[in-house]
Amino acid sequence: MSTAGASVVALAALGAAGHGGYASDPVGAVALAAAATVSTVVAARLGRSGHRAAGRLAAGLAVSLLAYLLLTVLTVAAVATGQPWAAVTVAAWNSAWIPPLALMQLTASAAVRTSGATPWTHRVVGLTLGVVTLVNAVLTTASEPFAGLPTIAGESWRTALAPVGAAATLLGMGALLLLPVTLWRAALGSHETVRARLGIAAAATTAAPLTVAFCLLLAVARAPGGVEPALGSVAFLVALSGATAFAAGCALAAARGAAEPRQVTVVVRVAGLTAAALIIAGVGTIVAAPGSSLGPTTVALLVSALTVLVGGAAWVATGLLARTLTSPPPSGPVGPETTPRVEATIAPTHVGAPHLLPSDTPPTAEGSAGTTDAVTGPDAAGGSGVVGTADAVAGPTAAGASGGGGVGLVALGGLTAREREVLAALAEGASNAGIAAQLVVSERTVDAHLRAIFMKLDLTPGGTTNRRVQAARIWLEHSRQRS
């Protein structure tokens, strides 16, 4: 972290000499350096735990923040000394805040993957944000960089081909919403530890679009609200740094597998209350604008009422969401078939690292799943039903799978390595979307694997229990015997 420290010292020296304005403000510089340090530590821990892809992305996140710091030093020095190439560094510096947004999302998303393949969603986010960064650097130029009008002040920047720049901005925002939507869908359709892990990763990816929303709010606040430009821009650097550290920390928590309810609650509430604060600040800025016809008392009452309503709703909603992510599945029927509850003991399995047959290659991810009662879902390979990691999976199992030498247990040897990964994820409580998110395959592929698994295990529809539950029961029994 010597590079980050040297950059902070250099910016402090330039600021003391009267150069750089907000860019050399020590608060923003220290925040970026701290976020880079957190990302470096997370990268090392992810790498040691076997999550190499997430570790590499976290390292890239740290490098992008350090590059932003170094580029700021270079740009401020170039402008201060009147270098002919200063315009190039200003253009690069003006776009250097975009790559960390993509990398914080990719790091959190990669932390819950159990496959080394790169998801198409990662490719879309990386390519789109790369294009947006290039377009922003090429089309946007500063009229007077660091001359009192920083990034959030629109009049200090000229954008060539404005429609192209606007389209790139909208495209980038859309790309930043892709991973949150995908991961939240996978999380809410799953159960048990899988749901909590995916929920933490989803909350982490939400930090990037919230950061962009905060940037846009600062731009709005400056025009009607008279917010000091330098103060607003330093606030943006702090927000970017905080979002990066939050996402990196969430990535590490998601990779560990076993998420405590309190931990999930904190993560979800930070994301939800941040969104609520942005809504309150945005509306409050508009109603308190100098040109507003509302008096100070009216503005204060409106903002107070909005804070109570939006803040209270966010607190309740995030609490409910956190309980949903951490609550065990119900023991009653939730699908077209029912499974009566019985007491039996099944050893817990490990998230992403199930007990495999001798021919298996253990996956790299780790973490442990707790044990609860099993739950049935729609009896279809492509259904949204899920199965909790179970202390009990009741009802008759197919093909005599309830015994140690049952046909179902023997049939596990006929499953391919990928089918065993799918079955292990199913037994942990993952929905089809959750399995697809972890194994980096499409839901159609998951559906095909499940149908093949059911056929090989001789599980037919229409029995007294759900095929998904029966398949999970076979896997858990196999895990218990090998533990």
Image (spheres, helix red, strand yellow):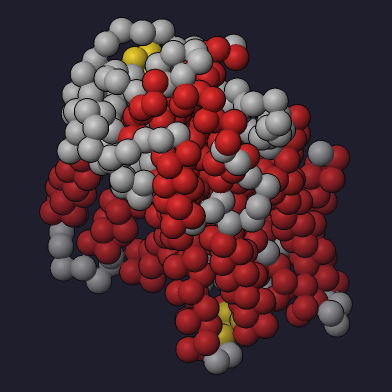
Could one spot residue 234 in this view of the protein?
no
At x 27% / y 64%, what residue is drawn? 286
Could one spot residue 281 in this view of the protein?
yes
Count every numbered label the image shows and give the total. 0
**Rendered position, 114 above or below 65:** above
At x 52% / y 87%, what residue is drawn? 164
Judge from the rendering whether residue 196 lies leftward or rightward of residue 16; answer left or right. Answer: left
Q: Nearer the viewer, residue 322 or 374?
A: 374
**Rendered position, 24 above or below 397:** below
At x 74% / y 46%, what residue is drawn? 56
Q: Nearer the viewer, residue 63 or 330?
A: 330
Residue 306 rendering spot, x and y as whole percentages: 19, 48
**Rendered position, 126 above or below 296:** below
Quarter of the rendering occupied by the N terminus: top right
- Residue 21 image-quadrant placement: bottom right
Q: Nearer the viewer, residue 410 or 439?
A: 410
Quarter of the rendering occupied by the C terminus: top right
Residue 46 rendering spot, x and y as whole percentages: 69, 34
- Residue 53 image-quadrant placement: top right
Q: Nearer the viewer, residue 146 or 164?
A: 164
Residue 86 rendering spot, x and y as whole percentages: 80, 76
Residue 194 rendering spot, x and y as whole percentages: 45, 33
> Furthest residue to the bottom?
161
At x 37% / y 35%, what residue is drawn? 459
